[in-house]
Image (spheres, helix red, strand yellow):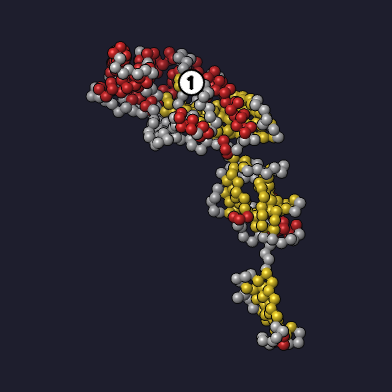
Amino acid sequence: MGNLKVEKIGSGNKYRVYIDEDTKEIVATVYPSGQPNHPQLKTTKLRIVEFLVKKMEGPFTEGGELVEEMFSGKTYVFKATKFSQDVTLIEKLKKVKWSVEIDDCGELNDLPQSEAYIEGDDICYKYTPRKCERVRIYAYCNSPSKGVSIQTELVVFPMAIARSMRRAGVVKDSQGSDVTKEDITNLGFQLPADRIKMLTRLNQAYEEAYGITVGNDEDKIEERDNIVEYAMKQIEKYNVHSDDKLFDIFKNDADDWAMGDLDDCLHDMIDFFQNNTKTINFFEDPRLNKAIASHNSTENFISGLAPILSDAIRRNTGISNALKVDDMITQYVRNEIEEKPDMLGLNLQDLNSLSYPDKFGGLGITIDGTQAFNIYLNEFDLDGDAYQGKIQLEILDHYGLDSPDILKKFIRKHEEFTAWYILQHLRDYKPFITKIRLNYTFTGELYSENLTIRLNEEEN
């Protein structure tokens, strides 16, 4: 029972008033002439009605459009639209409090009342989210309740919107098997003790190098054996040299494969290789970025991206988390992508490959084929039907030779590549991952297929 209060009323009348804690009612009993059993005894019960926020709506843009997702750094409006009592708008504004919970952390932070205001019959609040994954906004009078709150996901930049099936570095496939490429590992062989193992590995690599099946074809077997034996003798010939001598051969002869800025860049890459301690380390260089950005392989890839990005923006009426790539780690094969084409974000697998096989300009020996790519959306702004944004193309490549490489004609006959192969696979020098990051701006309109992507010279 609640507090008890007894007072005299008039000529000898008494009453008792208390709050029933179970029913939240005020109970008032009048005792005529102070007699508890008087036939005219009356009891009245009044329900206590608390002032509560009963309903919220939002988030709205400042222009009044209801949205399902928010962007960090932009201002949105939440509204308290239904209440338990009809009081004046000024009283509502004073009584309603606002709090926010970030990323389901369980901790609520009070929001300043200065951002609350009256709009029509509603109490509104302007909120500008910081960078996080989601927020929950509460409107309340006494204590916050999830029943009267709104949780909203945020679109956070940079957002990965596309990736290649393959990954760079130490990776696993969708079944959990290690599918790390050999060009990033050490074979662990010691010559001459492991000559048979080395020959076996080179024989296995032959079919991959030339894209053929040898089988029992005697001519193909003879051709394979000749190539493998030649590569093996070259490895044995140069394996007698010290590490320093092998690096001298690598650096001096590598000049034949690069010119200008890329020749200097190549020497920096070899130095990085000589001092590298982990295969997950990245090498970046603006000279590589510049050469890759202007290459027709990159330009063709970006041209192919434009209509795909335009279609995605049109289908989503802008940018949403539906475009975000959830898995940036697993390596997939094509049939998995065919079963679930959206798993890589924008499906770019049919675009021209990012390959740079220039033999003498410098990109052939510094990059050649690439291992993986990622595309990140860094900015996006929609103004009516017109939009603009920024994307980054990230290209990843292993700077290493594998066994199929050393069997190819133009490689196996040059001592610099033999030196490189020995240092990496027999001397345990660590290859690394070359990273190229190219920044672009884009513009377009929601209901048009025309989207223009331009290289952002200032940010490259």
Q: Which of 211 and 180 is in front in this view?
A: 211
Residue 18 falls in which quadrant of the image? bottom right
Q: Is residue 418 visible?
A: no
Give left or right: position of 122 versus 404. Answer: right
Q: Can residue 303 be seen in this view?
A: yes
Reading the image, the residue beneath label 1 is: 355
Q: Which percent across, then down, holds residue 324?
A: 55, 36
Give left or right: position of 390 versus 198. Answer: right
Q: Which of 345 and 136 is in front in this view?
A: 345
- How many neighbours does mark 1 have within 10 angstroms: few (below 14), some (14-19), or many (20 or more)? some
Q: Which residue is drawn at 53% across and 23% down?
A: 351
Q: Which residue is drawn at 55% across and 26% down?
A: 438
Q: Which percent across, then down, holds residue 96?
A: 68, 57
- The quarter of the picture where the N terminus appears is bottom right
The amino acid marked with disc number 1 is Ser
The kind of secondary structure element at disc 1 is strand
Please tell me whether residue 232 is drawn above or below residue 456 in the rendered image: above
Number of numbered callouts drawn: 1
Please tell me whether residue 90 is drawn above or below residue 327 in the rendered image: below
Q: Which residue is drawn at 28% across and 22% down?
A: 200
Q: Which residue lies furthest to the left in this view?
A: 193
Q: Which percent across, then down, holds residue 261?
A: 50, 18
Q: Which residue is drawn at 65% across and 57% down?
A: 140
Q: Which percent across, then down, holds residue 238?
A: 30, 17
- The quarter of the picture where the C terminus appears is top right
Q: Which of 90 and 220 is in front in this view?
A: 220
Residue 208 falls in which quadrant of the image? top left
